[in-house]
Image (tube, coloured by chain):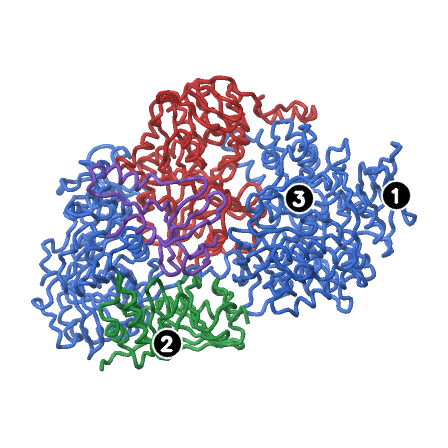
Chain colours: A blue, B red, C green, D purple
Amino acid sequence: MTQANRLSGGLVDRNSTLSFRFDNRNYTAHPGDTLASALLANDVRLIGRSFKYHRPRGVLTAGSEEPNGIVELRTGNRQEPNTRATTAEVYEGLDARSQNRWPSLKFDALAINDRFSNFLTAGFYYKTFMWPAAFWEKLYEPIIRKAAGLGSLSMEDDPDEYDKGFRHCDLLIIGAGPAGLMAALTAGRAGSEVILADEDFALGGRLNSESFSLGDDSASDWAAATVAELSALPNVRLMPRTTVIGAFDHGIYGAVERTGDHVAALPAGKPRQILWRIYTKRALLCAGATERPIAFENNDRPGIMLASAMRTYANRFATTAAQRVAIFTNNDDGHRTAIDLRAKGVKIAAVIDVRDDAPINYDFEVLKGAQVVDTKGRLGLTFVEVALADGSRRVLECGALGVSGGWNPNVHLTCHHRGRPVWNDDLAAFVPGGDLPPGMTVAGAANGTLSTHGALLSGAEGAAKALGLKCALPDVPEAEDAAINQTPFWYVKGCARAWLDQQNDVTVKDVKLSHQEGFRSVEHLKRYTTLGMATDQGKTSNMGGLAIMAEMAGKSIPETGTTIFRPPYTPVPIATFGGRMKGQDFHPTRLTPSHYWAKERGAVFIEVGNWLRAQWFPLPGETHWRESVDREVRQTRASVGVCDCTTLGKIDVQGTDAAAFLNKVYCNGFAKLAVGKTRYGLMLREDGIAMDDGTAARLAEDHFVVTTTTANAVNVYRHMEFVRQCLFPDMDVQLISTTEAWAQYAVAGPNSRKLLQKIVDPEFDISNDAFPFMGCGNITVCGGLRARLFRISFSGELAFEIAVPSRYGDALMRRLMRDGEEFDVVPYGTEALGVMRIEKGHAAGNELNGTTTALNLGMGRMVSKKKDSIGSTLSEREGLNEPDALMMVGIKPVNADDKVTAGAHLMDASGPVDAQHDQGYVTSAAFSPSLDCHIGLAFLKNGGARQGERMRLVSPLTEENVEVEIVSAHFVDPEGERLRA
Amino acid sequence: MRYSGFQVIKQVLTGHRGWIPAWRDPEPKAHYDIVIIGGGGHGLATAHYLAKVYGHRKVAVIEKGWIGGGNVGRNTTIIRSNYLLDGNEPFYEFSLKLWEGLEQDLNYNAMVSQRGILNLIHSDAQRDAYTRRGNAMILNGADAELLDAEQVRKECPFLNFDDARFPIKGGLAQRRGGTVRHDAVAWGYARSADGYGVDIIQNCEVSGFRIEDGKCLGVETSKGFIGAGKVGCAVAGNSGRVMGMAGMKLPIESHVLQAFVSEGLKPVLPGVITFGAGHFYVSQSDKGGLVFGGDLDGYNTYAQRGNLPVVEDVCEGGMALMPMIGRARLLRMWGGVMDMSMDGSPIIDRTPVDGLYFNGGWCYGGFKATPASGYCFAHLLAQDEPHPTATAYRLDRFRTGRMIDEKGVGNQPNLH
Amino acid sequence: MHDLAAITALGGSEPRVDTVADVTCTEVPDVALASVTARSSQETKAQKALTKLIGVTTPDIGRFAGDPVSAFWTGPDQWMVEAPFETHEDLAQQVKDAVGGTASVTEQTDAWTRFDLNGARVLAVLELLCPLNARKMAEGDAARAAIHHLGCFVLCHSPDAFSVYGPRSSAGSLHHTITTAMKAAL
Amino acid sequence: MIIPHPLLGPRDSSEFVYLGDASLIDRPDWQAENAAEAFYDYAYLRGNPAGEHHELWYHEGGDRSWLVVTRNTVTHEISKVELARDVARAQGRSK
């Protein structure tokens, strides 16, 4: 198809032609086109539908402030809703579709809403849809939700890669227009580390959109030459296609680089977008200004756009929305558009200027003191109706209307620390206020310096000032330096259905109603009418709404309020913030030293924090996990089993005050622990609640190895450092984690000693006398490998934990399996581990749940009153020591076939079942192969005194209700004879 | 003026000329029976129930800015009563019941949408804990349902089941949970309270309390002194600052919680979903935006803005849980300042100062609590004793060791 | 001599080597590590002893020095001593002997895994991995940095040669992250 | 945020873990007769000013130093950073 509206000149590459699709029709474009410019070139004005009334919509702007021209880009799992046609670069094969319409863009059934617009005024839904109550979810809401929303997701996983990175500089320049380029030149030549970022794929900003010249060059040539010089400087990094999205604390800026959105497909491994965290000493905001529209009746038809955008399409993209256009303006800039378009052969129907003293032009008609009062054209503009100065009406035929209501400085990023812009009367606009993010300064149009020459100069000066440069500034080329005369003109009097927020369909009428109903603050206005809440965040609509509200209230605009902006500057894909941390890479994975061996054994793994641990080791023929787990338990208790317990935290505690230090962090005493001995320790939080438990092994007078639970390893280490550095700074104690350094295996069961004796080097006697229960020491194994041996037991059996340097862990496990064959050794996983500790009545994570005290855990007497330890004082508060305090007990079903469910609640055997009569709850439950029935650990009110009592165990959630007996938590070997065997 | 479909039609026919302000804009009187500091959700709800349930009409709500500008306008709009502990569950269930009748009670459509909330389970220990919680909910008269992985997959096929670092093993569902149009809650309560004669005084900042021999006589404000028989403070987020004027130190820290909304999308999510292995929860608004959030920034702050690390952390969680939202764009982020209490639970109680009452410490549970908080605070103000469902929310519970610690992280506010 | 065979952090018998364009990532198991922390009020004595051991003055904050036995600063009065594994498997003991009672010594050899990154564009890879301003790092600089949420040490040997130490149990994740960044950046 | 570490210079706050009010250094004497009240105050009634705040940060992803950071809770401006150990000693804490 021919590009009917393609003009001469421009910055597109006519030497090559790209083909693309929109709503399943093929079109052609040139490299350098955006989807919007390409569609206009192909004489397509209708691009979308509005949110509420489904009114036909075309493009309003030529940039990221676009409220109307949004489409669904790409297909399949790469479908990308709500994409701005005005910033999307055309690539070969691009496929875009209009959205929020059915069945088609030209005929949209929900356009019926437009007919009922009188009912659908601001906030109408707060006043109805209330009867009957149940109908909201069933009827009203589904209809509203289906109609609402804009584009749609594919519902498939995003297949692209995303990345994150970090960059540092002395000066971050945001925006590569005249001010930004001059700033970069100034700082770059001075040798500073500079990053120049711009959201556009072509650096130059407005310079690429204007016809005037800078010095002897055209504006765009000067921009190109400057960019060429900058890219040759090693200390300057140019970041096109990069939007600085937010100014965060202490000079950290977020920036999104679109590395893959302008190509049809990415090479493998290359990210679609990169989220950069830019650390900079200074930032210079050169974000330019955004033209503002004028509200008038039916000002939302396709073909009606900002005059400056029209100029950008003509000068940069060599295209026009129509061959015959009119301009509606309140300032000279609108005339400039008419001149440029005419120079490109576009017919100017007229320039309609609200000012009686508007400049005349002999090349086209200027209607002074005139206003557009209405427009025609269902799917695209055909006529505008003008009220002339003398009150008479005139109808102009035109396919496009350029509107210019003056300019708003882009203060967006200056507000990111909630600073408020201030009103400037000369500009009739808000300019950056005093309370900018520290380190940020503003130059060029963003600071209210709207002339090109002014922008160039302020860019150079801004950079020099920000960096405190003494050197001479680069020469600033001669450029347009027109004086600014912005007499505000917000809307045409008497209009009602005049659009302010074109995407959300907020009209002048809605603002008036909002005022009438008392929603008069800016915040109330926005929330009640949804003004400025659309995907463009009101960049072109907030000011108009505010001005009209001010007029209603009879106040000035600054009195009425300001609207501040929040990050991000433009919307950012959620995946970009996610970066690489998705799927299996969401968190790092920690593997135990025996992992590869366990994998060979066909182990089933389970996530424990970031660790992967073997849960059980199924044998051929075992069809249910219980078979494997029961076997592992029985075999361990009958002979010997091995379990990788490397994941437990290990902290090396050394120093002459090591014992005194442990006395502080553990509620029980450690001062008198003999060298070569290990002791169980309970740690409290300062609020008296149990924090963690583990063992401390004394390897020397001044050397302990402390173990923590897997889950709390990091917190306990942090806590110990706190106690060491902040509470007892003069204690001679040094801490370091050794969790990863040692592969540690539990070897448990009556034959554990026999097995170990085959591995431990003969010079080390580990007989019961030489190495009794709770003994520990440094040894060697397998002919001289340094190792540590602890005689501790979680299973309740005769058991040891043996540790060797991690790199030998794999070999040690294989050796234990080989040498253990004669004892029928079995590897066991976390399930069997859990079963055995429940059988033994050892508290674990489910019991140390952050709300339980030593008393609850049945260790009340462990809290030494003879010394100061963290948490001991507050553990004595009355609320933690009530007579009917929860106590840990064992639970057995009266009927052996009944199941005990963790999370079930205990009730008196006879009596109501409700929250008021709740007696406690089951923390851990398992099937015990040793007792051949389900058992559980529970917290029960006054549990210590209730052994033998029969109670109801109820779990309405899982529809269980069984009779249980309260028993001792130590189901197996209560006297602990096996431990000491 | 009563709102109804009929009223709308009538106004359409008369060019909408008849609509009147939703609430008056009165000047403060010299004295009120009860003055409530804070025109947020809780303060306005308190006024509504004081007037409607307890018959107090000489009531003023004073707000330093515009009503509903605090956390009721800056949250993720979720309502639920899926709590574990005795001190909490009855209160939040009472709140959920009030939500269920709210629109008829207020004659204002706050779009209470009971689309359900689903807490995902990723480990056996988590299933045990959620089982205990679900049972506690049912024993307290709330609804709860335990789902296995297959049931979750059926309801939310778009979740990451096949390539998850922390596989989904099930979920705890509360079907009666859901979302509410948050701003409308403040406006609805304000309009109703105003209708009963309550004065809502905006742009009136409290500068101090007038306290004589241990009794609070009223408040000094930017609009002059306002006398009061009783003063109720409901300014969560600023509790420390305001109660400090009464010489009180609170077991509360101020922290910022960020929230996020995406561009409008056609319906993709059935209800509220929370990730059990990362900091991410999400729902979809009636306008189509994905409304989501995660963890606190974690440092004391009064600035209503956050920083990048948490933004990334939340989106990482989102991508890990539902990679199909990757191409949806984050449109807007904002921060609300939370009253983070020392056990993660709120305070509704008298204070050592006679005639001064306190409501705060809502952490990030404040929005869902709005109706019950207002109701219970009104009850306390009117009858000088705690409402039956709020008896545990005492100011002295930390001294006595009767904390209500749902998360079990102790006296560390930024972990709750 | 014992007869247990060691495996690398990535689980192989031989170190893993990956090359993308002009950057190479090499797994380095042949290194022994021991941490040294001075006892209270023994700081100067401990530093003297350490200086003697590594042959140069103990490195300052954010620096490493010494050859073949070297050390890098890890915290106040704390260093990590590095030496070839073949010759110094018992490094911790050697260091203990050197510092005597002036410092606490802890074997750290298998607490860490090391990857060496070499190549002209290694900086482009590092800026995707960690917040360090690697462009400003000079030979002998050692810094702590979070990579993929893992606490790592980054040592700069030259502008195109860096070493990354990460927790051994997460070697696979760290390696995956590094090679992914290499593919993305190069 | 960026925390200017007294030893390591500017470091991204994401390397740190936040604890809270630096008054947590002043742990009461367990044998004082008002110990119960003092510990309640210590554990639960912390400073929460809108303005300058002395607070504890732990450099977990760094040298594992506990720091006392003086930071404005309204602007987030950091005016001072010290090693907590030095602060504790200065306040007379020892063993």
Residue A366, numbered circle: 1
Q: Are marks 3 and 1 on the same chain?
A: yes
Residue B117, numbered circle: none
Tell me the CA gap for discs 3 and 1. 31 Å
- Few, some or many residues within 10 Å of mark 3 (<14, 14–19, 20+): many
Mark 3 = which residue? A431
Name which residue type carries label 1.
Val
Q: Are marks 2 and 3 on the same chain?
A: no
Question: Residue B371: x percent and y percent?
Answer: 44, 30
Q: Which quadrant of the figure contains the C terminus of chain B?
A: top left
Quick check: B274 above or below B356?
below
Name which residue type carries label 2.
Gly
Q: Residue at x 72, y 44 (%)?
A: A292
Left/right placement of residue B357 relative to residue A890 reads right
State the SS at label 3.
strand
- Few, some or many residues within 10 Å of mark 1 (<14, 14–19, 20+): many
Question: Residue A541: x percent and y percent?
Answer: 68, 41
Q: Using the rendered image of the protein, determine whether residue A182 is visible from the camera's viewpoint.
A: yes
- Mark 3 or 1: the one toward you: 3
Q: Are marks 2 and 3 in contact (CB under 8 Å)?
A: no
Quick check: A24 above or below A962?
below
Tell me the CA gap for discs 2 and 3. 57 Å
Name which residue type carries label 3.
Val
